[in-house]
Image: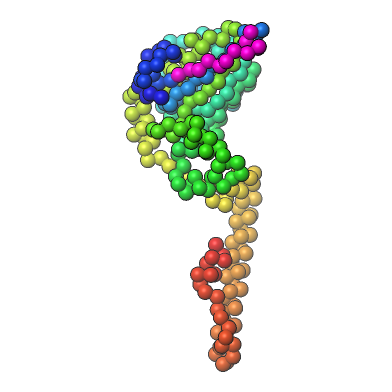
Amino acid sequence: AGFGRGCGNPDCSHEGHQSRTKEMPNNRAQERFGIHSFTFQSRRPFSGARLEKLLKSWPTPRKQLFTLEELAASPVEQDAHSDMSVGETLRPVLRSKGFCWLDSEPLRQHLWAQAGKTLDVRPGDWWWAALDKEQLKFKVTYPGVEADYKMAKKEKWDKDVGDRRQELVFIGGPDMRERDIVPLLEACILTDIELKEYEDRTRQLKVPNDEFHVNGLLKNLGASEDQIAEINEKAEKSREEERSRRKQDREETDFLRSLGVGKDLETEDEEDVFEAID
């Protein structure tokens, strides 16, 4: 996918076009009820501020969205659509779902899920491309995760940005018009200047290691912070007891040797002790 500023025509094949849409195949629902769908795709981030403004205009009474208090938002820009006209444009959308890439939280996927009167856009997992080698090795040890990674590498990978992307599927009735919805989404995509600033700002960002050890595994398995702290406390107590036992064993062995007995007794090697404890 290209990274230049889009030309405004979703059917354009010019390499600089920043996003593209894909019509889904016809089916009986489309023929009978006028239900149809399209997919919006881009390899540039959304402006978190502009996307939040768009989502707040969505005509759904129940929303669970990321907020600018949670994210380091970029400046809001005015668009040519009033909230009312945006709402009318989006009203025929029956369902939409997919992945978002936000400039405000660049290391994480955001999961977009909208059905009927409910809209939910929330942070999800880390982008695969954001993980370093050791984090990736830890991550793929989870059941089924390695297959997900291989699928992403095979089907979703870009040589410049990895699996980071916008990939949103929209399903709607006969009044849903792709030509009206796509410009709303493209207006949220970073401009050339914003993209350069984003790249400079995020170049040194790294995924924290908090989740990529035993504590992270426990958290992903559903353990609370208190439960993790209790497990760590018990583990430390067990290690301390093991160290004390080994120390006492060495002292008893040395004492027997000082009496001229137990010469064939062997003390445990320090390296073995380390491996046994850790």
Residue at x-position 37% and y-position 40%: 204
**Is 26 included in the stretch rendered in magenta?**
yes
Residue at x-position 43% and y-position 20%: 19
**Residue 66 visible in the current orientation:** no
Compared to residue 275, the image places residue 252 above or below, namely below
Where, by quadrant of the figure, is residue 90 drawn? top right
Work out whether residue 67 or residue 130 is closer to the camera in this orientation and state it.
130
**Residue 203 visible in the current orientation:** yes
> Is residue 20 found left or right of 259 in the rendered image?
left
Work out whether residue 81 or residue 195 is closer to the camera in this orientation and state it.
195
Residue at x-position 56% and y-position 65%: 277
Position of residue 164 measured from the top left corner of the image (x, y, whole percent): 46, 31
Where, by quadrant of the figure, is residue 4 drawn? top left
Residue at x-position 46% and y-position 10%: 81
> Is residue 168 found left or right of 106 in the rendered image?
right
| Residue located farthest toward the bottom when viewing the structure as drawn | 260
Position of residue 185 measured from the top left corner of the image (x, y, whole percent): 47, 18
Q: Which residues are magenta?
A: 20-31
> Is residue 117 found left or right of 193 in the rendered image?
right
Position of residue 221 measured from the top left corner of the image (x, y, whole percent): 63, 45
Work out whether residue 117 or residue 220 is closer to the camera in this orientation and state it.
220
Q: How is the image coloured?
A: rainbow
Position of residue 39 measured from the top left corner of the image (x, y, whole percent): 52, 19
Q: Quadrant of the N terminus?
A: top left
Q: Quadrant of the C terminus?
A: bottom right
Compared to residue 224, the image places residue 265 above or below, namely below
Query: So how many labels did they put on this image?
Result: 0
Where, by quadrant of the figure, is residue 222 drawn? top right
**Is 108 included in the stretch rendered in magenta?**
no
Compared to residue 27, the image places residue 236 above or below, namely below
